[in-house]
Each structure stands twice: as structure tokens, then as C-alpha cells.
Image (cartoon, helix red, strand yellow):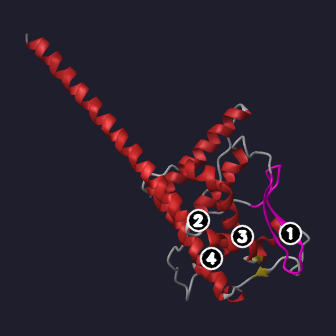
Amino acid sequence: MADWAGVVSAVIALVGLGFVVIQLRGATAASRTQATIQFQAAFLRSQEARGRLQASFPVHVSVLEQVAPGCSNGEVRTWSKLTDLSTEEKRDARVVVGALNDVAQYVVDGLALRSALQQYHTVFVRVGVLLLPFLELENSRVKGRSQARYGYRIADLYNAGISYHLHHWKHRGRELVLDRPAAHGDERIRLVLLHSDGSGVGRHDGIASEPNSKGLRTLYRRWKLRRTVKRAERKLRQ
């Protein structure tokens, strides 16, 4: 009888543990759903600033040759120091930085980064190309002292966006461009951020380079995409 009592107790304990696991999974799913809803609503609030930024924010001289080789300053507005930017451009930059920081926070709160990448990975890359030099100068050392790490999570989103585009089967082999009006006249100019062969802008130092791996190409790409997304999620949640 004592043995049967022990078995019954063990079964009851296992059933109880199963209910706990189910409840935890339900709570996690609810948290992710809520985070996704909040993310979408919050991100829409920065839509106008993002539109202006992608249409007219000048390109930093350090990346001009990568995205528009052979173009002159007459075709593409450029900048090299913060004083080259207008008050309105700095304001839009800070609004967009705040929106992307919110994306990172929603990942911390339960949003699956893959969900954000599926909808906005092109935005993360385009905005990253324009704003990372801005953030580097904003965070530059003053009188030998490091400043606050303002907007540092944007590098993680930018890097994740590049990897998502290069390795996801829907986007792999396609150009990622930023089409915008030329600096003067009515013409438009195409800034090619990622070429169809995978070349283009590089990852930011915020995330270390991926180690090499061997295996079937398709499985490798899937593994690398999953690993990159998970790594970015962990970093954002630190």
C-alpha cells in the first residue's frame, strides 16, 4: 500500500507540474501578444519622423562611398559633424532613436525579435545606416570621459536586420535600397545598402562577427539566421 501511495503522490505531483507549465506558457504567450500590440502602436507614432529621416536625412561621409559610389555631394547631401545637421534633422533623429529603443524594450518585455524583423528589418537597416554615425558622435568621449550609451541598442537591431535580409530565403539575393529625392532638382537617387550578392554596408561593432561554420548551405543559413536573431534577443534583454 505504501508503494501505491508513493506512485499516486508522484502522479499527482506530475499532473500539478504539468498544469504549472501550461499556465507559464500561457502567460508567456499573453505577454508576447501584449508586447507585439504595444510595439506596433508605439512604432506607428514615429512614422512621420521615420519618413522624413529616410527621405532627406543627409548621409554621413564615412558611408557615402559604400551606398553611393561615384556620387558627389551635389547629388547626395552629406554631413561630417553634428553642427552640419539642422535642428529639425536632429529632432527627427532623436524621435527615431527613441522609437527603436522602444522596440528593444518590447523585446525585453516579451516581443519576439523575429516578429519585429519580419515587419521592419528594412527600416532597421536603412535607419541604422543613417543614424549610427550620429549616435557615435553623440556618444563620443568628452574631455577624455565616455558618455552615456545613448541608442546603443540600435546597432543590435541594425545588425539583426542585415543578417535577416542576407539569410532569410524571401530576401536573400535581393537588393536593399533607400530610394530618395536627389539633393537638387527633381531626380531621385538609389542608395544601395545591400547588393544582390550580399555585399554592401557592414555590420556595426555592437555585435561580433559570426564564426565560420560548415554544412549544407540551406541548413547553415537557417541555423545562422536563428542564431543571429537569438543572440540579438539575448543582448537586448541584458
* Residue at x 8%, y 13% (from the top left corner): 2
Is 89 part of what is drawn in magenta?
A: no
Q: Quadrant of the C terminus?
A: bottom left
14 left or right, relative to 74 = left
Would you name the residue on which mark 4 appears?
A: 93
* Placement of 221 over or under 125, stated as above or below: above
Disc on the earlier residue, 4 or 1 = 4
Would you name the residue on which mark 1 appears?
A: 189
Q: Are dots 1 and 2 in contact, CB under 8 Å?
A: no
Q: Residue furthest left?
A: 1
Would you name the residue on which mark 3 appears?
A: 54
Q: Are dots 3 and 2 in contact, CB under 8 Å?
A: no
Q: Amino acid at mark 1?
A: Ile
Q: Secondary structure at mark 2?
A: helix
Badge 1: how crowded within 10 Å, few (<14), some, or many (20+)? Answer: some
* Placement of 196 over or under 214, stated as above or below: below
User: Mark on residue 14?
Assistant: none
Disc on the earlier residue, 4 or 3 = 3
Q: Which residues are magenta?
A: 175-201
Q: Quadrant of the N terminus?
A: top left
Give the Cα separation between the discs numbered 1 and 2: 25 Å
The image shows residue 95 at horizontal and vertical percentages of 57, 75
Disc on the earlier residue, 1 or 2 = 2
Badge 4: how crowded within 10 Å, few (<14), some, or many (20+)? Answer: many
* Placement of 223 over or under 37, stated as above or below: above
170 left or right, relative to 182 = left
69 left or right, relative to 94 = right
* Residue at x 75%, y 82% (from the top left corner): 79
User: Mark on residue 154?
Assistant: 2
Between residue 107 and residue 41, name the one nearer to us: 41
The image shows residue 175 at horizontal and vertical percentages of 80, 53
